Image (cartoon, rainbow, N blue to C red):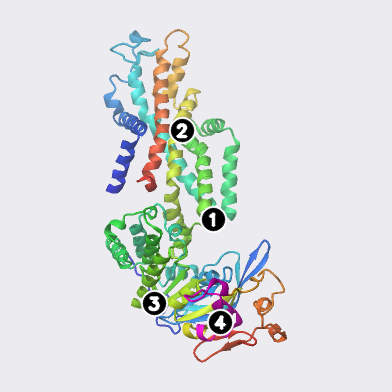
Amino acid sequence: MTEALRHARYVLSENPVTTFAFGLFTFLVLCAIFGPSIAPYDPLASDTAQALHPPSLAHLFGTDQLGRDILSRVIVATRLDLGIAVTSVVLAFGFGTLAGLAAGYFGGWTDRIIGRVVDTIMAFPLFVLAMGIVAALGNTVANIVYATAIINLPIYARLARTEGNVRREAGFVEAARLSGNSETRILLTQLLPNIMPLMMVQVSLTLGYAILNAAGLSFIGLGVRPPTAEWGIMVADGASNIVSGEWWIALFPGLVLMAAVFCFNLMGDGLRDMVDPRQRT
Amino acid sequence: MSVVPSKVDRGAVPLLRVEDLSIEFRTRNGTVRALDRLSLTLRRGETMALVGESGSGKSVTAYAVMGINDPAARVTGGSIVFGGLDVLAAEPKVLDEVRGREVAIIFQNPRAALNPIRPVGRQIADILLRHGNVTAAQAPERAVEMLATVRIPDPKRRAASYPFELSGGMCQRVMIALALACEPALLIADEPTTGLDITTQAVIMDLIAELAAAHHMATLLITHDLGLASEYCDTIAVMHAGQVVEIAPTARLFGEPRHPYTAKLIAATPGSRTRLETLASVPGSLPDLRRDDLPACRYSARCERYDDRCAATPVPHHVFGDGAFVACAHPL
C-alpha cells in the first residue's frame, strides 16, 4: 500500500499538469464536503432589495434575480453536481466494465446478449435517451444518476470487451487456468487489474461528460428543480439576463462547470499512470 | 482457510498412466487427428522427455494430462489416470484442485505467462493461498522463500518486482518457483528453455533437475532438443505426427534405436564431433493430420524401410521388458 502511495506521489511530482488537475479536484472535493459551512450566505435566502447586484466585495460573484448570493450557490452546488457525476460514473464503470469483460472473455452467447444490449443503448442519441429516462421515471436526483450511468455504460462495456477479448488467450491467463483458478476468479484477479490503466483514462473523460450531462438535463428543466442550487439551473436562470446586461448570473456557474470538466479530463493521464506499475521507472 | 483434501494419491504406481489416448480437434478446415493411440507411464521421481518435431502433439499431450479441454477438442478414445484420478472423467471442480497443486506446468515464454501488472512475490502468494497451503499472513514470507529456492538473488527485494523488471532467465526462475510452490507430484516443463540463451538454458535445466530430485517429483520435459533430453532425462518418448513411435531408457535409445524415425533423429542431432556436412536430415515432413486417409503408421510416407507390412492396421505395438516400447511393423 505504501508502495502505491509512493508511486502516486511520484506520478504527481512528475507532471505539473497532473498536479494542477489533482489540485483542482481536491479543491472541488473540499467544496463538496464543506460547501454549506464555508459559503458566505445562505444559498436559498432571497433578498429582493439586493437583486441583480454586479460582482462586488460583499458579493464576489454578484447576486441573481432574487438577490441570492451566486458565490454561495456555486459552492453549495458542488456537492450535488460532483455527487451525481461520481455516482453515475462509478455505476457505469462497475457494471459496464464487468459486463464488457465477461462478454469479451467468455464470448459466445454472453457476448451476443451483452453486445446487443449495448448496441441498443448506443442506437439512441445519448442525451435524448437520458432525457427520455428522466422524463419517464421522474425528476429526481436518483433518476438523473441512473440516466447518466446508462448512457455512459456502453463506452465501458465496449472498451472492456475488446481488452478482455485480446487477453483471453494471453499466457498469464492460461497459466492461471492451469494452476487451478476458476474462470470468474481469472476474470476478477487477472484480467480486471490489467485493463485498469485504460479504464482509468475513460473514467476521467466520462466524469466530465457526466457532469455536463447532469447540468444539461437541469438546464432544459429535466433535472434538479429550482430553487436547489445546481450549476446547470443557475446557467439556465441567468441565460435570459445576459442580453439585459446581467452577465454574471450565468457566467460564474458556467466557468466553474467548465473548470470541473477541464479538471476531470486532465486527470486521465495521471490516473492511468497511478494504476499502471509499468510507469514506475 | 480450509485445506481441501488432496484429490489424488501421490503414492500411486505408476503416478501417471496414459493409455491409447486419441484426441482430435474439430476446426473449420477439417478434423485434426492430433493424438493417436498415445500411451505412456510415468513413475514417481522419474524424468521423461517428450521429443518430437513442432506439431507432433507434444503440447497437446501435456494439456490433456492437465485436463484442459479445448471446446474444439474431442477425446475419441483412451484414458488418463493421474494418481488414481481419471482425469478425463473428473469434474471441473476436482481438476481445479489438482491443477497447480498436484500437477504444475512451466511454459516456454515465462514473461507472457506472468501477470504483467502484479509483483512476482504476490503471484506466488496467490497460488499458495489458492491451494490452501498457508495462511494469508504466511504467504508473502513463503513466496520469498520460494524465490530463494530458485536462487534469485536478493529474493526479498525481488518479490516486489514486476515481470517487466526481470530478465528472461529470472522470469523463468519465477515460473519455476510458481510451479513448485505447492510441491506438485508431477511437473510438466513445456520447452522451458526455448528463448533463453545457452548458458541460462543450462542453469535453468540444472535447477529444474535438482529441485525435481529433491522433492522426488516426476517430470515430463517437452522439447524438440534431443541433446537436452538425453542430458536430463531417464526415459525418452519420441513422438511423430501425434503418435508415440518409441519409448526407451535414454542410453538404450541412443545406443540402439528401434524405430527408424528415432534413428534418423539421432543421426540428425549435432554432437561435439559432428560436422555440418555430415549431419543427416529426416526427409519429408509431417503428414497433414486433417487427411481422412492417414496411414496407420504416420511415418510410413517418410520411411526408407517402407514395405507392404507397414499397411497393417493398427500399427503393431511392441513392449519390451524394461518398459521400452516401439510402434513399428518391422523395427530395427
Amino acid bearing label 1: Phe
Give residue B176's quadrant in the image. Answer: bottom left
Task: Indicate yes or no whether the magenta region holds residue B272.
Answer: yes
Tags 3 and 2 touching, CB below 8 Å: no
* Residue annotated with mark 3: B217
Q: Earlier in the sequence, mark 3 or mark 4?
A: 3
Residues under labels 1 and 3: Cα distance? 35 Å
Residues under labels 3 and 2: Cα distance? 58 Å
Task: Indicate yes or no whether the magenta region holds residue B29.
Answer: no
The quarter in which the C terminus of chain B is drawn is: bottom right
- Residue in the foreground of this view, choosing between B179 and A161: B179
- Observer-side mark, 1 or 3, equals 3
- Observer-side mark, 4 or 1, equals 4
Q: Residue at x 48, y 68 (%)?
A: B190
* Residue annotated with mark 1: A106
Say which element carries label 4.
strand
Q: Say if labels 3 and 2 share a chain.
A: no
Relative to B316, is B161 on the left or the right? left
Tell me the number on the disc at residue B246.
4
Give residue B233's quadrant in the image. Answer: bottom left
Q: Is residue A86 visible?
A: no
Q: Residue at x 43, y 17 (%)?
A: A250
Say which element carries label 2.
helix
- Observer-side mark, 3 or 4, equals 4
